[in-house]
Image (cartoon, rainbow, N blue to C red):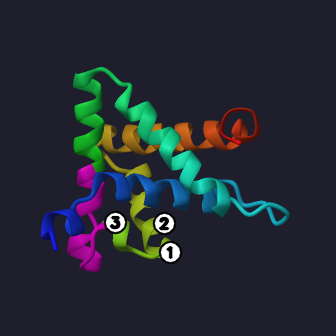
Amino acid sequence: MDVKRILFDHDATVSALVHSILLERCADPDLDPSPWANAITCFVLQQRAAMPVHTGMAVTWLTLLLDIWPLWRFGRPFHRLEHARRRVVMAGWQISWLAPCQDALRLYESLTLFAWHTRNEKLG
């Protein structure tokens, strides 16, 4: 078992972010976002891969920083937390004094919401 992969997993962190954003921002009692989560995660990862190298590397490093951020408080990386604890970490990043942290979270929210609202046209 690869310990680095368990602790710091970029794709799993993006997936956890997408799932949490969908639960928080796209809560519709008539429509469960879960079936769309994997397709939306793939869309977000594709958009990250399409970024210029310097931008993509910055986003990757911020994503990995988000993944290790909760280790000191919860003893687990972001992608291994349950939704309630992810929400706490995300709320902290939204009000962080580090603008790149806010920007990274805003980027993931924007991509996730864009994919959610266009899911029938592009992802379905």
Q: Residue tagged by mark 1?
A: 84
Q: Secondary structure at mark 3?
A: helix
Q: Is residue 33 magenta?
A: no
The residue at which mark 3 appears reads as 78
Question: Range of the magenta residues?
Answer: 64-77
Distance from the alpha carbon under mark 3 to that under mark 1: 11 Å
**Residue 53: where, in percent of width, then height?**
24, 23
Residues at discs 3 and 1 in contact (Cβ within 8 Å): no
Q: Nearer the viewer's eye, disc 3 or disc 1?
A: 3
Q: For the residue carrying disc 3, how many other residues have a C-alpha within 10 Å: few (<14), some (14-19), or many (20+)? A: many
Q: Residue at x 57, y 48 (%)?
A: 39
Question: Is 82 left or right of 3, judged from the image as shown?
Answer: right
Pick whichever of labels 3 and 1 is earlier in the sequence: 3
Q: Amino acid at mark 3?
A: Phe
Residue positioned 66% across, 60% down in the render: 35
Where is residue 67 drawn, in percent x and y?
28, 59
Q: Which mark is residue 112?
A: none
For the residues bearing labels 2 and 1, Cβ distance under 8 angstroms: yes
Work out which quarter of the rendered image holds the C terminus and state it.
Answer: top right
| Residue at 50% across, 75% down | 84
The answer for how far apart the CA atoms under marks 2 and 3 are is: 10 Å
Whole-percent x, y for residue 24 in the image: 62, 60
